[in-house]
Image: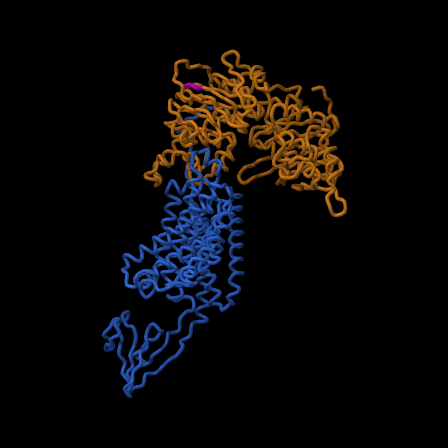
Amino acid sequence: MTETDPTEQPVSQAPKRRGLGGLLAHQESGLVLVILLMGLGLTVFGALNPIKPKSLTDVPSTSSVMLIDGEGMARPTGSLPRTEIRGFRVTYGSGGSSDFLTEDGWWYDSDTNQLSRQREVNAFLNKANLVLIVNNASFIAVMAVGMTGVIILAGIDLSVGSIYGLAGIVGAMVLTQLPADMSVALAVPIGLALCVTVGALCGLANGSMTVGLRVHPFVITLGMMAALRGLTLVLPSEIYNRQSISNFPESFVGGFFRAELFGVQPVPILFMLVVAGCGWFVLSRTVFGRRVFAIGGNETAAGYAGIPVGKVKILVYTITGALSGLSACLAIGYYGSGETNAGNAYELQVIAATVIGGASLMGGRGTAIGAVLGAIVIQLINNAILILKIDQSYNQIVMGAAIIIAVVIDQTKQRLAAKRG
Amino acid sequence: MAHRADQTTLLRATGVSKRFGITQALDAVSVEFRRGEVHALMGENGAGKSTLGKVIAGLHKQDSGTVEIEGHTLEPGSLDGAFAAGIRIVHQELAQCPNLSVAENLCLHAIPKRGLTVDFGAMRERAARLVHTIEPSIDVDKPLGRLSPGHRQICQIAAALDEEGPHGGAKVIVFDEPTSSLSIHETDRLLGIARDLASSGVTVIYVSHRMSEIFACCDRVSVLRDGRYVATSVVADIDEPTLVEQMIGRRISTPGAKAADALADAAGIDHHTPENAPVKLRVRGMSSPGKVRDASLEVRAGEVLGIGGLVGAGRSELLDAIFGLDPLATGSVEVDGVDVSARGCRDSIGAGVGYVPEDRRMQGLFMNLGIDENILAPMMPELANAGVRNLTAEQREARQRVQRFQIKTASLKETTPDELSGGNQQKLLIARWMRDTTKVLLLDEPTRGIDVGTKAEVYRLVQEAAADGLAVLLVSSEMPELLALSDRILVMAGGQIRGELTGADMTQVNVMTLATQE
């Protein structure tokens, strides 16, 4: 009716909310806050209830102390940098000697002439504990990044735990046959390729059946969860008559997945960071990722807009399977063995991580970074139960409550946001 | 209108205000409803007419103001209170279980029992008594979801009139946009029911924006505009232009003309038939089991081919089949000489077909994504480098389209489509397909549920598209719109094309005659 000059139309970017409110508006920053608060609480508790030194030994004045280096050779005190000291050799006046290794927590203080086993440390805030939390989280987080894609699609994958189990056991069965002195450059790619391929094939089966047979993914993946777990139990017992398979090439375990860096074993964490980064990039910066969101938001409309709905879905399930396989490979490398019951009930933890990370089971919403943070929250809860010396049996109760609380908080936030308009 | 309503006031809304977020849906509205009248609430979309109906029925709680029935003030926002006072609402998404039978639906509030088990005989009998007084052909054993929309609505009316219900008979029935999904025959039937109810002393509040229905069945009409009360008039004393003026607040310059005609004129639509223009869309022998039978058509560049017919004639199904969304469809489709028969909609899109489907919310919009991604959904791959999005190009393109199509949005990225008005949602979906490569545009009910002002804009967009050399295939149930926009009209009935109308033959009567052939 009225002729308006098109250039007059204002298309302003919405004013960015600033300050704390703006930060809290993002699911991720909310989670970071939760993690920091939990960490703070546990730190305070950990400081009040520190891990006590276990023993304190005065070195007899008639004895001499030497350092032990990486090769196990004795060196005079002061000849090695702190980080290269592997232990202390006390030679008694009587002629005998004993080694006190740093591995076992021993340290020699030349000022007091005392050998002490661990100084008093914060039960939560110490390097070993923090790395342990994040390492444990990384196995879940890698799968949760894939699960995020599935849940954005308004789908679900209950079979991730079983895929993890199967991929791990298949990887282990092959790795145990490889020569013990195989090089890193060969053993690691073989292990990765095997586990990821097994996982991807399982995911491909999930996706193809869901799309091709038009059955709800809940049903398909529930069936796959049982079937794949069965396969995991059958395979090693048929072939090796064992439920646990170890003896991998050393290069695969200590040489790579359990490799030490700065006194910790960070390889699973590094993988998690890379997967999270890739997940973020794919979901937010690629056409494929945005199609996942579009399908989850309105599958019918996606069809009308020419989006290849079936292909996208199959690919998402395949990627989730592949990531479950990757996670299994990290785990067998880190722990040095494959177990038939590995990954049991992991689907619960993975879905919990995804949902706590802000993905909506109605579809259309979720982030890879959120899923990783969600996995860390879950491990923090596990760790808290350990540190607070609560019976491990309560773990599941707390976990279940955490899922429900997370979803309720999230939905309340959504409703409030909708009301604000 | 040969009907005399009682002159006493039955229901009175006084100073009712209601706010949704930043939108003032109702602003101190006062209306009186008399006993035994059909009282229309009219207005553009967003005028507040539906909100007022829902406040009266207790579905919404007003922020201030009162609703009184026979002198008693109703508790605000209490559906039970309104129900007990004899107020019923017939509303599309209300309290029906499509998986249960008609009988079960009608007796849901008090299922007849024999001991611990359901007395199916008594239930069936009671349901039949209720529903058959209005429509004897309804089978009460059928699942409600399998009935036509019109019959489903009749079941709601029957339930509303249930005098054996927990609170006795109805005094007021609110019809909220009752005909939006009904065929013309069903609409007539409904209007008759509304009149019958009024003559039996029930007050009918009829929320609608369909002009013809107001004049066909209402005694008085109250107009709302932007949440404010404008006027109440006796229908017999008012004409369409005056009503339209009340609704949109500005006078339309062609008195006597149909409102939509006036809008079409305002948009400057002229009929031209480009005889020598190349054929951009050629459909041959399109069939789909149970939906479309042997449909063939051609649309030339710059031509608007209208498809008329009643609801259920297979028009949307034909568009789906042409676009490649119907896997069972057979027949050939040629777009600008390229054969895209039965190869799926991605090939059609690649060949230059755009499709704005009928149901914006269900088939068109992604409510979880921003305006930019909603507009760019089909062309994101073209803007991307090897699958990685080019954010700069996307922003430029989206901004351009938003400005060209005058989509009123607060932001490109942060705003989601559910925050837009219906008209802007529709413009967004049209903008989605208006690309340099688009040669054929399929439009299904492009002005359904959008306000009068935006309709004119959509008409102008259709006309511009044709002027740019696009072939436009337009499905519309609004007769004046179809007649005004189309260069030629095909009329469908029962899944078949029944005839073609050109030039002076394009009249409402001719379209109806063909549409009712079956």
Q: Which residue occupies the foreground of this view, A314 or B228?
A: A314
Instruction: Kindly report the secondary structure that dominates the magenta region of the rendered protein.
Output: strand
In the image, taking residue A33 as reference, residue B36 lies left or right, namely right
Q: Residue B507 vs residue B391: left or right?
A: right
Vertical comparison of A85 with A9: above or below: below
Indicate the position of residue B181 as horizontal and vertical percent values: 59, 29
Inspect this view and state whether residue A138 appears. Answer: no
Whether residue B160 is in magenta: the answer is no
What residue lies at 67% left-to-right and 27% top-to-bottom?
B39
Which residue is at the far top?
Answer: B504
Image quadrant where residue B120 sits = top right
Q: Is residue A73 visible?
A: yes
The picture's colour for chain B is orange
Q: Quadrant of the C terminus of chain B?
A: top right
Classify B431 as above or below A138. above
Which x, y percent locates residue A334?
A: 37, 62
Give the side of residue A273 with respect to residue B60, left or right. left
Chain with blue colouring: A
Above or below residue B86? Residue A412 is below
Q: Residue furthest front?
A: A238
For the N terminus of chain B, the image quarter is top right
Q: Which stretch appears magenta?
A: B298-302
In magenta stretch: residue B301: yes
Relative to A334, does residue B291 appear above or below in the rendering?
above
